[in-house]
Amino acid sequence: MPQCEMCGAEKASLTATKVEGAELELCGDCSEFGTEVRTESGSSASTKYSTSSSSSSSSGSSGSSGSSSSSSSRQRDMFDDMETVAADYDDRIRRAREAEGMSREELASDINEKASVVRKLERADILPEDDIQEKLERKLGISLVEGREVDDADWEGSSSGSMTLGDVVQRNDE
């Protein structure tokens, strides 16, 4: 028997309801907290989280047509421009520090941080804050961003084959 996604009550029938931007399957009591959403097919609502092949094929066909239209009309948000910290940032920091022949304390002093912060970063206990990430990248000559390296690989094969003035200015600033 399906459960209400808000209160957890087991009810025979649930209603697709939008509550503060999230679409939920709610019982009659909880559906008053949002607005009812009309669904195209009643069967897809009950198998929303199912991994069976029948529900994936029905949602896959509607999802592919919906994603192509929604991707072109979707508004950009702040997360589109965010860079992802590399999964191996701890190894990159440690290798670059050791290649420079620096101790953790020396590196911490050079970037005006505590040695414990450098130690925690090298053990991947914490993620680097933006300001610390910039200091480390500048001091050690590395990139802590996923998929971006400091070497010339970025400049060798672009899709258009041309560079703009902005690319040159950015390149000189690095």
Image (tube, rainbow, N blue to C red):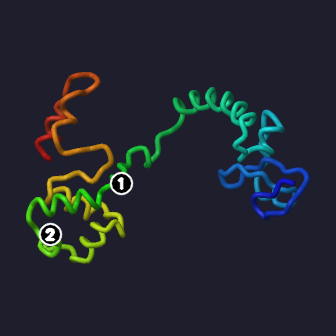
Residue 76 vs residue 111, the one in the foreground: 111
Out of 54 and 79, give the one closest to the viewer.
54
Q: Residue at x 29, y 61 (%)?
A: 90
Q: Residue at x 14, y 63 (%)?
A: 98
Disc 2: CA contacts within 10 A as few (<14), some (14-19) or many (>=20): many
* Disc ID at residue 107: 2
Residue highlighted by disc 1: 87
Q: Is residue 123 above or below residue 73?
A: below
| Quadrant hosting residue 20 | bottom right
User: The residue under label 1 is which amino acid type?
Assistant: Ala
Q: Is residue 148 left or right of residue 52?
A: left
Nearer the viewer's eye, disc 1 or disc 2?
A: 1
Is 119 on the left-hand or right-hand side of 100? Answer: right
Dot 2 lies on which element? helix
Q: Quadrant of the N terminus?
A: bottom right
Q: Earlier in the sequence, mark 1 or mark 2?
A: 1
Please, what is the three-letter code of the amino acid marked with disc 2?
Leu
From the viewer's perspective, tell me whether residue 52 is left or right of residue 96.
Answer: right
